[in-house]
Amino acid sequence: MAGIKMATPAAKPEEYKNVFVFLETREDKLVRPALEMIGVGKRIADKVGEKLYCLLLGGNIKDEAKEAVSYGCDIVLGAESPDLSVYRTLPYSKIISDFVKEEKPNIFLIPATRNGRDLASRIAVSCEAGVTADCTELDIEQDTRILSANRPTYGESMLAEILCKKHRPQMATARAGIFPVPDRVKSPKGEIRINSVKVDKSLLKKEVLEFKKKNAVDLTAAKVVVSGGMGLGKADGFKLIEELASEIGGVVGSTRPAADMGWISRDHQVGQTGQTVRPRLYVAAGISGKIQHIMGMKNSETIIAINTDPNAEIIKYSDYVINADLYEAIPALVNSIREEKKKLAPAAGK
Ligand SMILES: Cc1cc2nc3c(=O)[nH]c(=O)nc-3n(C[C@H](O)[C@H](O)[C@H](O)COP(=O)(O)OP(=O)(O)OC[C@H]3O[C@@H](n4cnc5c(N)ncnc54)[C@H](O)[C@@H]3O)c2cc1C
């Protein structure tokens, strides 16, 4: 990594080829950040005429391997075992490190999800590589095949470009929700290599007894997000946000201070330290528009701000502004949406 002297000798870059991405799954299904990794990995691999390898681990992964190929993966390297059906640090990092040591990829990308962050650091240590965390832009220099890994720094106010010139693989984690999901390819031609593996018992120190499903909100897939901030003034204010969200088929988001106050659970938080969203519509009610929040929602297709302050920063990023008290504006909006729906609904009894 730039500016850090590694203790280990540099790798011979010419011996390292192709792009690896880790495909994260939940209950043996690819999660959205996995598809995002295929998109960015394919773009980078194509630019230098190399292949995209997708690493897939799980209990039953054959269908998802086909799915990965349909999105443009050239080679799926899979390891299948009932012991891999749930993410566990030790077996996952061991198997993936072995793949990396054997195949010697030039680049290895992992989504910056909780599991991805855990995995990336372990693999980097095991393969004596560095890792640039939480990238929001990734590209490759065609001649040198050096990854340009860009990540926000100084409280998101600047973008740092990090180059790993000597060590291989060049590893990066990519912030979830930033990179688009690619289109499916017309005639997929990928190769699938899945091995049934026996996981070494010494790597299964933790036994998963039960999976308790938390009703975690997945804002990243939402088409409409209605977020509330400190302008709500109290926890009860989120009832109004929920009402508007449910009227327009959206999910509820929040700013960090609103979550810090305990007005809403942390999994609703949008922003640098929350989730990154790119819905078709984002409504920001009582939100000032500080950069840490903007980072998580600026790629929304249409942004509507509801704010009493005509100079609030959020306004610079908004397509429409309702310069009003949200306690007046939201009930008025909800009422007019209901009226419109009534008009559009076919008359009863006809
Ligand atoms: C390292 C770091 C990471 C961070 N990560 C995140 C993050 O992930 N997400 C995040 O959101 N923040 C994050 N923050 C915090 C961020 O800097 C801001 O403090 C936060 O986004 C502001 O939240 P807010 O807009 O709800 O509150 P405020 O900044 O207090 O804004 C409230 C807004 O409501 C308006 N308002 C007040 N009353 C009304 C009313 N009745 N009707 C309409 N409008 C009204 C005001 O005009 C104002 O614009 C982070 C900060 C740091 C340092």
Image (cartoon, rainbow, N blue to C red):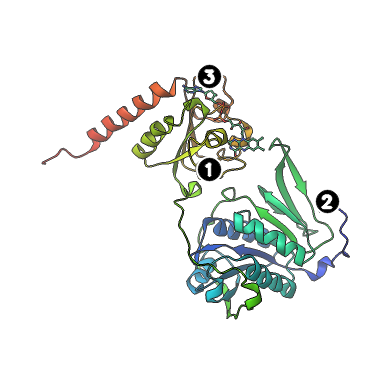
Q: Residues within 10 Å of mark 1 (few under 14, many from 20)?
A: many
What residue sits right under mark 3 in the picture? 309
For label 1, the residue is 266
Mark 2 or mark 3: name the one nearer the start of the chain: 2
Task: Provide the secondary structure element on which disc 2 rests.
Answer: loop
Kindly tell me whether mark 2's CB lies below 8 Å from ligand 1: no
Instruction: Give the amino acid type for the residue marked by disc 1 in the picture.
Output: Arg
- The secondary structure type at the circle numbered 1 is helix
**Ligand 1 sits in which quadrant?**
top right
- List the residue tagged with mark 2: 2
Q: Indicate the position of residue 256 as horizontal and vertical percent values.
A: 57, 36
Using the numbered discs, state the Cα–Cα distance from disc 1 to disc 3 in whole angstroms. Answer: 26 Å
State the image coordinates of residue 109 (x, y, percent, origin top left): 67, 59
Q: Nearer the viewer, residue 43 or 99?
A: 99
Q: Amino acid at mark 3?
A: Asp
Which type of secondary structure does the marked residue at label 3 adopt?
Answer: loop
In the rendered view, does 292 fall on the left or right side of 332? right
x%, y% of residue 64?
Answer: 50, 69
Choose between 98 and 65: the one closer to the eye: 98
In the rendered image, which quarter contains the N terminus?
bottom right
How many numbered callouts? 3
Q: Residue at x 62, y 61 (%)?
A: 42
Q: Please state which of residues 79 and 210 is positioned toward the viewer in this rendering.
A: 210
Q: Quadrant of residue 100?
A: bottom right
Give the amino acid type for the residue marked by disc 2 in the picture: Ala
